[in-house]
Image (spheres, grey):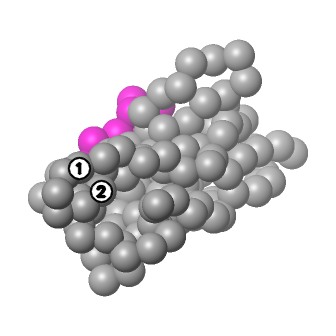
Amino acid sequence: QVHLVESGGGLVQPGGSLRLSCAPSGSVFGILNMAWHRQAPGKPRELVASMSGGGRTSYGDSVKGRFAISRDRAKNTVYLQMNDLKFEDTAIYYCMMTIDHNVGYKNYWGQGPEVTVSS
């Protein structure tokens, strides 16, 4: 059974930076799409950033120019670099990966590290 292991959340002041990382717990045949979503208290989950298997990226309007999604293929790890953090970035951040098991694909979700932006 594959699990996504996330790290990097925490408390940061406005204008600060954090980097989240996410990787599957075991070996996988391949990783296709990757994405980061977030959910703030009382709000629906929203897409923050995504990356296709070919490397194409897209971002939510609220984070464009501040956040960057990237991957390390050798480590099967996806990152979310978050710069110039704002109060409204406070949320639980969820990693999602579409993992190729050679016999089929399946979406997995991480446990969601919490990011708190506060002065």
Q: Quadrant of residue 32?
A: bottom left
**Mark sitting earlier along the chain (1/2):** 2
- Residue 72 in the image: state x and y as whole percent: 34, 75
Location of mark 1 (residue): 105
Q: Residue at x 35, y 39 (%)?
A: 59
Do residues under tags 1 and 2 come within 8 Å of each other at their CB atoms? Answer: yes
Q: Amino acid at mark 2?
A: Ile
Tell me the SS state at disc 1: strand
Q: Main secondary structure of the magenta part?
A: loop
Question: What is the number of the mark on residue 26?
Answer: none
Q: Is residue 8 above or below residue 73?
A: above
Q: Residue at x 69, y 57 (%)?
A: 9
Q: Quadrant of residue 89?
A: top right
> Distance from label 1 to label 2 (Cα)?
6 Å
Nearest the eye: 96 or 68: 96
Left-right relation of 51 to 79: left
Q: From where the camera sits, is residue 114 visible?
A: yes
Magenta-drawn segment:
57-65
Location of mark 2 (residue): 99
- Residue 11 in the image: state x and y as whole percent: 80, 54
Magenta span has 64? yes
Q: Residue at x 56, y 18 (%)?
A: 44
